[in-house]
Image: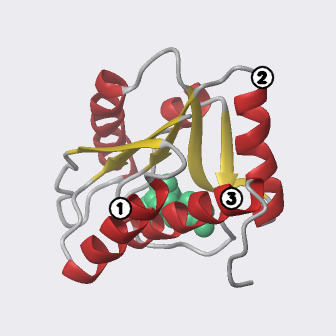
Amino acid sequence: MRITLITVGKIKEKYFTDAIAEYQKRLSRYCKLEILEVADEKTPDGASAAIEEQIKEKEAERVRKVLKDSAYTIALAIDGKQMTSENFAEKIQGLGIRGESHICFLIGGSLGMSDSLLRQADERISFSKMTFPHQLMRVILLEQIYRGFRIIHHEPYHK
Ligand SMILES: C[S@@+](CC[C@H](N)C(=O)[O-])C[C@H]1O[C@@H](n2cnc3c(N)ncnc32)[C@H](O)[C@@H]1O
């Protein structure tokens, strides 16, 4: 299974970089993981909703440039579908069984993702109704993918 994360914006804090490196190492047993970062746009102070939409669309274009058509695309969105970790593991396993060998997760930047990119994704999943910063979201997603593979392989992992 190949898993790609496409994320808008860089990781700035070392404690996030360390956590990401740890999950990349742990996941190397289970999948071929790649993380592609695209640049975010600076949002001017007091930007209107229309300007913010333009910024999100610009960032979406950068995501599309690296997004492979053949990948099954899952956008992370607050208003997406919520699920348990067991459901998430079943989703990853189910996609593999039906021949989707490449799953691509999208994480938006500080303004979120453009509507057009959200519509383009095969599905949207939510990790709660709360808003997480994109850097932390990357760590949470990697932890849940790792947890998912532990569940799929019936391996113990702290509850
Ligand atoms: C700072 S958030 C963007 C907040 C923006 N106001 C919005 O509504 O999307 C950055 C990115 O993190 C991801 N994200 C943050 N919280 C999330 C959650 N609870 N569930 C799923 N994804 C989330 C989304 O991909 C989002 O585009």
The reply, left or right, for residue 118 in relation to residue 13 is: right
Give the residue pinned by disc 2: 98
Left or right: 102 in relation to 135: right
Q: Which residue is mark 3?
A: 148
Q: Position of residue 28 (x, y in %)?
A: 43, 52
Q: Earlier in the sequence, mark 2 or mark 1?
A: 2
* Residue nearer the viewer, 67 or 151: 151
Does 145 sit left or right of 64 as displayed? right
Q: Amino acid at mark 3?
A: Gly
Looking at the rendered structure, the secondary structure element under dot 1 is loop
Q: Is residue 88 visible?
A: no
Gap between marks 2 and 1 measured at Cα: 34 Å
Q: CA distance from mark 1 to mark 3?
A: 26 Å
Q: Amino acid at mark 1?
A: Ser
Tell me which residue sits at (54%, 72%) in the image: 131
Q: Is residue 11 in view from this perspective?
A: yes
Residue 1's quadrant in the figure? top right
For label 3, the SS is helix
Q: Which residue is mark 1?
A: 110
Which element carries disc 2, helix, strand or loop?
loop
